[in-house]
Amino acid sequence: MLMGQSELMTELRARIARIAATSFTVLVEGESGAGKELVARELHARSPRHRGPFVALNCAAIVETLVETELFGIEERTATGVRGRRGKFELADEGTLFLDEVADLSPTAQAKLLRVLQDMSIERVGGQTPRRVDVRIVAATNRSLKALVQANLFRADLFYRLAGVELYVPPLRARREDIPLLVTHFLRAYGRAEDALSASATEALMTHDWPGNVRQLARVLERALALATGPVITVADLPSEITRDYRDLLYDMPERDDSLRAWSSRYVRLVLERAHGNKRRACDVLGISYHTLQSHLDYDGRTRRLHRQTAVSFPRPAVIGRPGQSPDPVRFG
């Protein structure tokens, strides 16, 4: 199930609902671990083919010499000791065939796949009788097929066969607001209570860029649950490479004796850095005006903190006496 309440995921689910009702070939693009197979399964579950099989094939794992056997099957007794079996196209008949990492297919495999997509007719290895199949193709890739076509690394004719309808799965860093919901989902899946992760640990997870996306988040939570020293996962239980930004930005703030203004200015600089220096974009992300942004950038918290530490205050001498009278000096000893 596709998890997320962000605007990006809401829009993605709406597009899936519209496309699922058709029988068109779909190309799903997105980074590794973003959830491309979940999108394919959602397309199948919402389609008129939902009672048929959903068959997944990792194209990157196919051995070149076995491409035809994997896709189209092999006839009985084609070679000594070989048993006949159906290929992925036959197994997916009247259902959906999910071709994951289709960009990794060799040129030879691309040509063989194109031939089948043109008429949906296959021949098993060692066979001579064509077999018609009724299969919906959903292909996925973590690389731009269009760029690969331009670099002559992918067949243009196959690309146009696959790219009738395209879906893009956003990376986790583009929808950070979905992280708490995903965390809750994984904690439940691992048999843990929703409060098994502290609020600060959740905030730390939301500061990370997650190059491995949702898959990486799941593995990090597994590691934390296995190694946590207490019933609740804290920031200290998370890997340092995950919490680095959070620690630099906020977690060690009390030890640095930071003021709220100093913290805010440091946060503004971090957002500006991630916006690649685009101040207009940073203002939009932060929800502040350009003048406020510039005020934070001009603020130097280190100078102010140094001033506080070096400033000398001279307390007024203690006063003894009644109001209206000149007090006597305080004597010791």
Image (tube, rainbow, N blue to C red):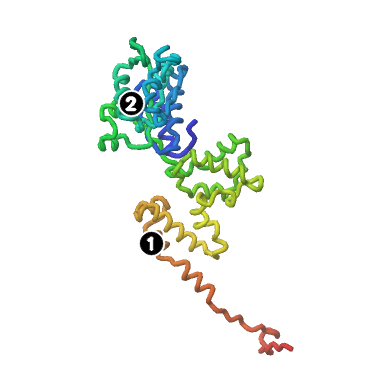
Query: Which corner quadrant of the image does residue 33 belong to?
Result: top left
Q: Is residue 271 above or below residue 85?
A: below
- Nearest-to-viewer mark from 1 and 2: 2
Q: CA distance from mark 1 to mark 2?
A: 56 Å
- The answer to whether residue 15 is seen in the rendering is no
Of 296 and 132, nearer the camera is 132
Residue 270 screen position, x and y as percent: 43, 56
In the image, residue 211 above or below residue 270: above
Residue 117 coordinates in the image, percent (x, y): 32, 20
Between 39 and 260, the one nearer to me in the picture: 39
Q: Quadrant of residue 326?
A: bottom right
* Quarter placement of the C terminus: bottom right
Residue 308 place in picture, x, y as percent: 53, 72
Give the number of marks: 2
Residue bearing the label numbered 2: 109
Secondary structure at badge 1 equals: helix
Residue 78 in sight from this viewpoint: yes
Q: Is 180 left or right of 192, judged from the image as shown?
A: left
Front-most of residues 210 and 105: 105
Per the rendering, the mark at residue 294 is 1
Three-letter amino acid code at the position of disc 1: Gln
For badge 2, the amino acid type reads: Ala
Q: Position of residue 88 (x, y in %)?
A: 41, 20
- Splitting the image into 4 quarters, where does residue 76 fall? top left
Label 1 vs 2, first from the N-terminus: 2
Element at badge 2? helix
